[in-house]
Amino acid sequence: MKAQPDLTQVEKDKLEIDPDFDFREIARRPFEAITPNELAMFKWSGVYHQLQPSFFMIRVVTPGGRMTTRQFNRAVDLAEKYAQNELCITTRQTLQFHWIRKEDIYKIIEGMAEVGITTKNGCGDVPRNIIGDSLAGAGPVQVGDSLKLIRMMADDDEIQNQRNLPRKHKISVASSNDAFAQTLMNCQGWVPVERDGVVGWKFHAGGGLGARPYLAKVVFDWVPEELVLDVTRAAVEAFRRHGNRRQRAHARLKVVVDTMGARKFGELLIDIMKEKGIEGLDRIEFAQSDVPTIGRMYLNGQEVVPQRQPGRSIVRIMIPRSELKTADSRTIANLADELGGGVIMFTNRQNIELHDVPEGNVEAMLGALHQAGFRTDGHEHLPDIVACVGTTMCKMAVSDSPDAYRRLYDALAHDEVYWKSVGTLRINITGCPNNCGQAWVSDIGLRGTRTRNPEGGSTEGYSIFVGGKLSEAGKIAEYLCDVPNDEVVPAVKKVLDTYLAHRESQAERFVDFCERIGVAKFQQLVSK
Ligand code: SF4
């Protein structure tokens, strides 16, 4: 199809280039014979050209963050052969391979397809991997069967074949109203509600981070479960029709919902469903208020979480910097098979949970994990830091966020007395304003900056933000101060020490402290 001349290059590419590449043919083609436009469209197959010319990142799709050990072991086999013995867990609960040569792309794609894992829609202007909460199906508080809905959405052609959206589209489905599933930062956020023993779903829309963050609004208070798929499809279609295709920075659903307001957006979805002849729409209830009321996350550092299924537990493993060496991955897979339920769950803080561990095996599982060098403490606390890939692999990065991670981790995450005294805390580091590292919604967010030097060149540093959260109505973190790169560790330590010195009591969490004193007062205190 010939594209209209006034469209942006990406929009032309989406019309003119078939995103389903034959990567066997690409393997034979010289790198120079691949056009930049084709390279950009590789993303639709989960293939992303790295900063380093002719090396690629491949992202698979794991709806709800769940993999069997058979699937995980296949990823490990492939990483051993083609990805420098390493896998990386993403904040959207899936796996990435890095350092893939062009000749090997198809081997990863075909190898994962053999165990039922696709890379289709791993990146690009498409519906992305559908996330949920890692406790889904097993956690002690389960209101709705989120995994069932996630599977339905992931298998739905009408949703998954929307491959020419104005930009990426992100969906989250939670299993309870507790803030595990990042509902408020997704384009669509589904949360279960129970009334008189019947489960329906609350629908939020319009969340998204990036350079300009938005928190989702409540659109419908109640959608009967049998209409959830129709509403999801309608929201994707509404985005296709109304997303801004002339300016990519404004192309997300968050802008559509913010411009229209939640009520009008809801009416638009109803109209789209009427066009399609969907019945029973009068059973959908519009939101009384568009302000979300997400619960606080009840997890606070537990290494083991008793499941709702009697006699079974979830064992939580910390994966520093989300980097999984293949030898360590094999250990985890073997333990999941021998002592657990053969299931690996990836979390949105880039860690791993092993589900269905029989109570009698928990001690042995923890012992084996610790002996193999894994850490199971520190979740939801200072050691649980998230960082994007930064200048190590990303073309857009202005800072080396993994390096900032390592320095913070090394300086603060081993002092158990200190980090336990700080209590619940999430630090997120992002290498540029795009905010893949989710700094906007963390207790302490670090965002890479570059400051021009008068004598030429620029200096790497970080802007520090505080007080972000995805619970209750949500809050975007507020700017506190700028620091040069080599002062990141003392600056974060000072922020934490200030909190420790001025909090009302041990029960006052960092995020509540930020809210109580306000950012202006916090700035005053840290500048002393
Ligand atoms: Fe790259 Fe920026 Fe995203 Fe980090 S936040 S991965 S540097 S685009």
Image (cartoon, helix red, strand yellow):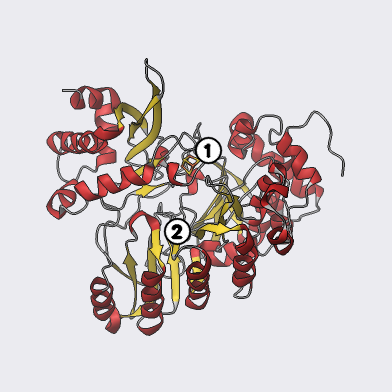
Question: As shown in the figure, which amino acid type bears the numbered disc 1?
Answer: Asp
Residue occupied by mark 2: 88
Q: Is residue 198 visible?
A: no
Residue at the extreme right? 2
Q: Is residue 441 visible?
A: yes
Marker disc for residue 290: 1
Tell me the element at label 2. strand
Residue 32 % position (x, y): 69, 47
Where residue 369 sits, quadrant-wise, is bottom left
Q: Nearer the viewer, residue 381 or 96?
A: 96
Between circles 2 and 1, the one closer to the viewer is 2
Q: In percent of the image, x 71 and y 64: which residue is there? A: 24
Mark 1 crowd level (few <14, some 14–19, many ≥20, 10 Å Cα): some
Q: Position of residue 203 (x, y in %)?
A: 57, 49
Dot 2 amino acid type: Cys
User: Whole-percent x and y of residue 108?
Assistant: 59, 66
